[in-house]
Image (cartoon, rainbow, N blue to C red):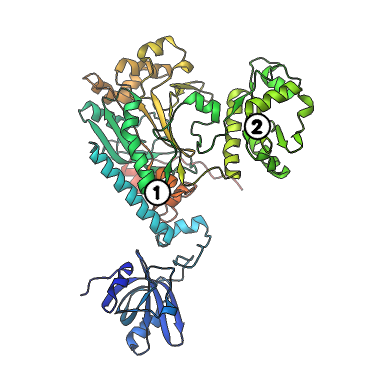
Amino acid sequence: MQKRTLSIETPSKIGQEAEVSGWVNSRRDHGGVIFIDLRDHTGLVQLTVHPEKKDAFAAADKCRDEFVIKAVGKVIERAPELVNKNIPTGSIEIVIDTLTILNSAKPLPFQVAHGHGEEQETNEDLRLKFRFLDLRREKMQLMLKKRHEMIQSIHRYMTEHGFIEITTPILTSSSPEGARDFLVPSRLHPGKFYALPQAPQQFKQLLMTGGVPKYYQIAPCFRDEDPRADRSPGEFYQLDLEIAFADKDEVVFQEMEPLFVELTEKFAGKKVMQKPFPRIPYLQAMDLYGSDKPDLRFEMKMVDLTEELRNTDFSVFGNAINPPTGGGGVVKAICCQGGARLTRSQIDELTEMVKKEGAGGLAYIVLDADGLRSPILKFLSEEEKNAIIGKTKADKGDIIFFGADQKPVVNKVLGKLRDKLGDIFGLKDSNLVAWAWITDFPMFEWSETEKRWDFMHNPFSMPQGGLEALETQKPDEVRAYQYDIIANGLELSSGAIRNYKPEIMYKAFEICGYSKQTVDEKFGGMIRAFEYGAPPHGGFAPGIDRMLMLFQNEPNIREVIAFPKNGSAEDVMMGAPGTVEEKQLKELHIKLDLPKPKAK
């Protein structure tokens, strides 16, 4: 039996016999000679089948797209006028002696063939239903390979830097970590449930207590939450890591920044915008960019004009700054360079967008060759106009947009507007990665739905100032040793220097309404461990899927995962979630209490 020759190897086999196998990418009958483009994971190679080889020709005549075949023949050079410069094997062809059909294929629900120009647009649910076919497409083959290469680069880096790969349990206990758990009923312990881990958070902290110096794994995580464009519903993978004796976030930053630089430059072939990565406090990020994951590839910072317009006669601004009900708001602006060329319809579209974000409208001033142009100019004094232009540093050809409301609303609205303008004016260089750390997150945030304080991020973070801060500061004043790693408008991970002292943990959970008994029930293993000498430690867990999205300029997370769920968190190929037999439910002591179908 001959060794299989891959398509990419065939140009080096001129004059030799080769055995190739793969899928029929296309078949052409040219005047009695049949040409087949055979595809394997390395590319395409042309097979030529002449009528003299009766058995091979008969088999080739039966072939259709995506038949699986094996062929043996002689590799020869093509005539110069027949060379295909678009593929690596375009200078040769294989003249076939024998051809065997290994498997046939039904008519395809959509085209998967390589090398035919732009890929056809296909309904996503159809692609996911036939994902085994979809994976044959050139783009998906490349994405699977790139994912493998990225993960191998991560493994090499972590090993070289002294991290130990350790796998942690999948079946664990339920804990309040921000999202809903996926619960698994126990047959051996009726009425009790395991939970799939939202993250290996407690286990990696226990590893630090157990004396592991540096831990990591490519960890599967499970969260029962609504689908989002940048997160795979149900499950995802992250580079989970923790470092012992990391008592400051700078320890984690210095340890891990080189990995992100290496992945950006060597794996993705892109440029890092700034080294070392900028450190931006959370409140400053919200104040300047209206987002805790700003795209820093372009400037367009927000400018606060509240004081300059405090006594304005323009009621929209004046009522925001000094509302009749009390509790003053702000007026802020962003200057879009070159934005004067926006059309009226584009400004109308932007206005509708910000209204959906909570704004009452979108005030603006255009600076064109004839001076200032805006419906609001008649309400502003010359002094106010000069102050606005001076502080925003606007020039001819620019446009200034305003937000006037309570600060959180203004920040959110102008942040969304800034991001949209970055798209409209092509300010997001796809070959540039603007990494940054967002630091000093608030420890707590008020939950309007629950009417209580809740943890803003990770409940296991160390508050800045320790126990004293929790006891003497208002909850909204407490800052945590928490940080996010962001890039190009994506949040790749949240992380923290951990809370490793029981008394601080009890107090932090008490502020959020959890009793000592509840903390002991939910986190007893970790509390006990901390009582036996836990070192300071910290880490984070950047998402594998989001990193690949970033490096491959892919906006759809389902394009970087082999077998993703659809937008409704369903696996339409495998039929999950699905029903189970009554016998299985009885073994688990479960009865279903399903909502009754609505009457038609």
Q: CA distance from mark 2 to mark 1?
A: 35 Å
- For residue 565, say whether it is visible: no
Q: Is residue 518 depicted above or below 412 in this figure?
A: above
Element at label 1 = loop
Please, what is the three-letter code of the amino acid marked with disc 2?
Ala
Q: Secondary structure at mark 2?
A: loop
Residue 123, above or below 500? below
Q: Quadrant of the N terminus?
A: bottom left
Residue 369 screen position, x and y as percent = 74, 38
Quadrant of the rendered image containing residue 95:
bottom left
Marks 2 and 1: CB-CB under 8 Å?
no
Q: Position of residue 256 (x, y in %)?
A: 33, 35
Q: Is residue 123 visible?
A: yes
Left/right of residue 228 with respect to residue 132 in the rendered view: right
Residue annotated with mark 2: 394
* Crowding at mark 1 (Cα within 10 Å: few <14, some 14-19, many 20+): few
- Residue 551 lies, in percent from the top left, at 42, 47
Camera-nearest residue between 180 and 102: 102
Mark 2 and mark 1 lie on one chain; the one further toward the N terminus is 1
Camera-nearest residue between 370 and 493: 370
Compared to residue 319, the image places residue 69 above or below, namely below
Residue density around tag 2, few if under 14, some if 14–19, many if 20 or more, within 10 Å: many
- Image quarter of residue 9: bottom left
- The residue most toward the right is 378
Dot 1 amino acid type: Gly
Residue topped by disc 1: 269
